[in-house]
Amino acid sequence: MSNISADHQKLDPDEALRSNMTRHLFRRISAHNSILIGGTVLGAIVFMALFASLLAPHDPFSQDLSKRLLPPFWMEEHNPKHILGTDNLGRDYLSRLIYGAQISLMIGVCTAIISGIIGSALGITAGYFGGRVDAVITFIITTRLSMPIVLVALAVVALVGGSLHAVILVLGFLLWDRYAVVMRSATQQARNMDYVSAARAIGCPTWRIVLSEIFPNVVNNLIVIATFEVAHAILLEASLSFLGLGVQPPDPSWGLMIAEGKEFLLFDPWIITIPGIALSILVLAVNMLGDGIRDVSAPENRN
Amino acid sequence: MSKWTKFVSFLIASLFGLSEAHAGKENDTLVWVTKFEPPTYNYYDQTLREGVILSRHIWDSLYWRDLETGEFKPHLATKMEYSNPTTIDITLRKDVVFHNGEKFDADDVVFTINEILNPENKYKNRKLISWAKKAEKTGQYSVRLHLGKIFAPAMEMLSTAVVMYPDEYYKKVGKNGFARAPVGTGPYKAAEVVPGKHLALERNESYFGGAKGKANISKVLMRFVDEPNTQIAELMSGNADLIWRLNKEQGKKLNRVSGVRAVAGETMRVGYLQFDSSGSTGEHPLKNIKVRQAISHAIDRESIAVNLQGGGQVLDLFCYPTQVGCESPNAPKYSYDPAKAKQLLAEAGYPNGFEIDFYAYRNRNFAEAMMGFMAEVGIKANMEWMKYSALRDKVRKDEVPFNFMTWGSGSVNDVFRITSYFFNHSSDDLALDPDVKKYLDAGDGTIVVEDRKKNYSEALRLIAERAHALPLFSYAYYYGMSDDLDFQTTPDEIVHLYRAKWK
Amino acid sequence: MLNFTVRRIFLVILVAFTVSVIAFFLVRMSGDLATALAGEDANAQEIADIKKIYGLDRPLIIQYADWLIDALRGDFGASLYFPETVGELVAMRLPTTLQLAFSGLIISLLIGIPFGVISALKPDSWIDRISMSIAVAGQAIPTFWMGLMLMVLFGLILRLTPISGDESWQHFILPAFTLGYYSTPPIMRLTRSGMLEVLAGDYIRTAYAKGLKPLRVLFKHALRNAVIPVVALASVQFGHMLSGAIVIESVFAMQGIGYLAWESILRNDIAVIQAILLIVCLFYVGLTFISDLVNAWLDPRIRVS
Amino acid sequence: MTPILETRDLECSFQISTGMFSPKKALVAVNGVSVQLLKGQVLGLVGESGCGKSTLAKMLLGLQRPTKGNILFDGQPLEKLSQFERAARVQPIFQDPYSSLNPRKTIFEIITLPLSVHKIGTSRDRVLKAKEMMDLCGLASRYLNSYPSQLSGGQRQRVAIARALVMKPEVVICDEPTSALDVSVQSQILNLLMELKNELGLTYLLISHNLAVVEHLADRVAVMYFGEIVENEDTEQLFNKPRHEYTQKLLNSVLAPDPSLFSRGV
């Protein structure tokens, strides 16, 4: 944080000329607001996921077929023991929702990490070395972009079978394109900086230049994209689950909960509304956080 | 709805000029909305249930099994009898014409059977006839069918699944031409085929009747909608008269909606757990008979059938009760008894349970519920969810020790198509029990009904006693229909629309 | 320019070839095709027969070469499920998907551009906040959930629109809206930032100074310039919509290629999946190719680099 | 006196591809340049932008491989030295102190980067060394843990100088060391450079636009024009009696100042 505010103290005279101060301030305030709100909500969900076993009122896997589909508290005939009712197999819906946060977050975060590693490695390599290396990697990126994600993910998951690991790996190996594109251009920018030349003149080995000179200067892009990709992965997993090839039961991902509730949509819409809203809030929070970070770190990118 | 919303709806509706519903009694059109469109209307070239159902409407079989009594009744044929155990002599009706006016005679029967039988013609559902060897014309209205070897349910097949094509028309339009403009003798003719959208059927006014009887409703429109909620919405909004394969909740809730109702219907599809009791997939606890019995006692099949499915019957034998040969009074029954299951597990040397991979391809909620029941006695089953074709493949490669699958017997009302199929040492057989095979071979090898029943009974008793597989329950689901419609469900998983009528 | 074009065409072909390899091997490895073909109640012998009949027992490389040569001739083979050839099948289903994607695109432009313009005119005002919230919310709601909710509301409760199917243009309202809404945020954002930049430019100030009417300045000068990158984005979004159509078509039971692809994956109809993967890819590459050309034509600097 | 750094017929050309199917063309940036840097002296290098000055500097720093010709250091071909050895002897000071300092690193990290790359000294030693260098370059040591963004342009350039000198190199390549700075700061930095040169016995290659600066500081001046050295003389002689037509033009343009020459940069 100190780093970011330190960068803000540098006032670009050009910028000051062009935009008036109030607007600038306004944007920063609203950026901080979205970081605050998004961060708080996301923090709450992460907390819920981390302490699921303490927070959940029931065992999320324990079934009771005679108590299926009990309605949530705002409806008549609800059971006070199950605040959000029970699911198709009579499992406590609130507990499953709490545990589901674990799975959905895990999918989002792990996918973003895997794709982040792949995409940054490709992007930085292409951006730093340029020339043929860049041409080959650009080609790989173009090829990847031309393949429809949902279709390929479905085909692969159909091939290897749906499981938490499979979904994370498949999405991780598919969602790296945005990282690669952004990191490539950020690296191209950074590598033309004199501090890179200075490091080379010092005799710094290439790996060290990439890791300690280039990477710290492009990593803020990485964080912003990562937040969007977390959201993207969570939604994609939900779509895969909806089409029947996502995470497998009894693990309760929110996407799977929506998918399982699909058949009750018409008469018991609360079954998909609850995880649907939870999912939307999670994605919204992650997106807000990403937006905020981007806005806050935007002026410095214009170097 | 408030005045305001009504006004806005009216405004937008008139703006968009929405077409009014075309379903219903007023225009004598039954709209049946179902999930899958048959890939082709050439019945023998596909395996989809919807296609099988259509075969009963557009075409006819030689005999017809009465849906109420189960008796075989003359239909396209006036007489069918065995002249010896591998030869059937058939005499045909003389007054039947196809939808296009072509006369029905022995040439059509011989052509149809020999055409499908020829492997070079690549019919995807050749197995419907593959038990026969060849058909031979013995007169303009008589045919002799050579079986090659004894096939007990031949009569059953000829009375349901084997339907007759018009030879002249078929030769003219070819396999794929026929697929888009099918012609038969049946109670309905295909009036309009719009692939990807719908199929319109019209009543065959010059239908000969036979054992099926003439159709009541003059037009049937079959529409294909993937999403069950959409199907229900279409029914509730009056755009559909009949939908099927609803689950229990949908059925129950639908009954509270005015103008429509839901009816539960049982089918002969059997759910089962298959154990690798022979150990051909390697070492695992299921090789121990006590473990298999423990699992059989651990799962509350009744509860799943009642609570999750809302219908169907719990089965004690590995077959559907109406199937010929599906009786065995001395076979043991496995009641829901977790305590006994735990005790059996302890005796088998697994007092703390064990972990095993559990494969399934449909009814995820049933599988999950079973996993829950097993977890209660200490067995941790890890679900492996696969596509049917992939799972089937894996079973045949001896890579699946424990699976939950289902079997519809191809709507054949004979244990030959289920019990014999799974225990005849084929690659689908994980038990490889020579005693069971011995009795099944004896049952399959005769056409004398009493001998068959005796042998099958022994085989079924051994299967249950040795817990090679656990039959779960028959499948059931709800049909949703408009209140105007009078429609009876049947367990053969076939929607007999020609029997439907308006109230 | 010619050089640039030739280079891009070469890249397009290379990408298409790579995708064809990926599509072929990815799809071919998923489960046994013959088992799928034979249906649920077939036995081992019946399946072995089918394998032989369809030539599925040959080495994969040979099967690939066969397929590629035929595909180059425009023959994508026979569907293993439908009686039509894959070419006929795709030709039959493609219009629905194109109509859906196109109307989705129109809707997202109709929402995205005006909101983007308004929020750029009054940045950080409440209307800016609201349109940005709409945008963010659009990205947070799963499409299938939204589709089902819209269906219940407009189709079932209000009875304003048909519920499912693709027979008339009314059938496209809900699905196109659902699909389009999801693509609105990027268009809105880009319009907004483009407008902000253009409005800050000197020539807009000059135009105002010359005494031109504000609306005229807005539409004639500002919007026209701000919209150029949006057009480029729109072509890419169109490509995304083709694949987004899978979920939408499945929800609304529309017989397009998205739904066809999904069904084909479920029943291992290999030739169809391969063809669709390739076609969607070609669409995407083709669209970016065209937008690249247009951009290069507009901005000569790109050609050189 | 033997030159400490010497180039012989140095040439560098780039392959420019004009299209996939047309042959590549060679763009010659540096063409047969032979210059000598004498120990303890300052060689000024002047010329228009794009004339190949920076390419020459890059080759001397080992950032660009020459296409032809040799670079000799103390009479030895430079290729024989590893980048490591070369780095200890030749160091650069860049034009733009905003881009030459990594914004994500502290002043301490920046100054001691050469030491840590070359694994010289313990971390304690490095702190002392950094403070010593900062002191030498006129920077208060309280900036040790600051980031470049907290420093002014002049201060940044001092950091860049400290980094260049921390390894005690023999030659420093100064590529427009002051042109990005405010006029008021420029002379401070130039004075600092001269002080350090005398104190540490350094040899400079001073690349500049500013002929006044070159005249003031350089012992010899080389004029570069389209990749070639057109004149290489003692400072006094060159400024008094320019021989080459281009040099004359260059000097004239200074007398009648062309604003475009001065306003380039940020």
Image (tube, coloured by chain):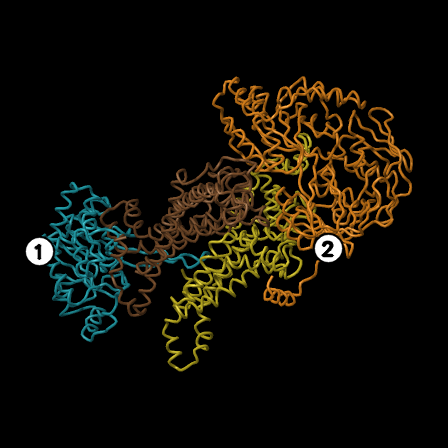
- Front residue of B73 and D206: B73
Both on one chain, marks 1 and 2? no
Query: Which chain is in cyan here?
Result: D
Residue type at numbered disc 1: Asn
Which amino acid type is marked by label 2? Ala
- In the drawing, does residue D205 fall left or right of residue C194? left
Which residue position is annotated with label 2?
B23
The residue that appears at 38% across and 56% down in the rendered structure is A291
Q: Position of residue C41 (x, y in %)?
A: 68, 34
SS assignment at label 2: loop
- Image-based side of B384 in relation to A116, left or right: right
Residue marked by disc 1: D198
Res. D181 visible in picture: yes
| Residue B249 location (% of width, % of height) | 61, 43
State the brown chain.
A
* Subunit bearing disc 2: B
Residue at 68%, 30% in the rendered image: C45
Dot 1: within a 10 Å radius of its alpha carbon, few (fewer than 14), some, or many (20 or more) residues?
A: few
Residues A28 and D125: in front is: A28
Q: Chain of mark 1?
A: D
Identify the hue of chain B: orange
Reply above or below: C187 against D199: below
Which chain is rendered yellow in the image? C
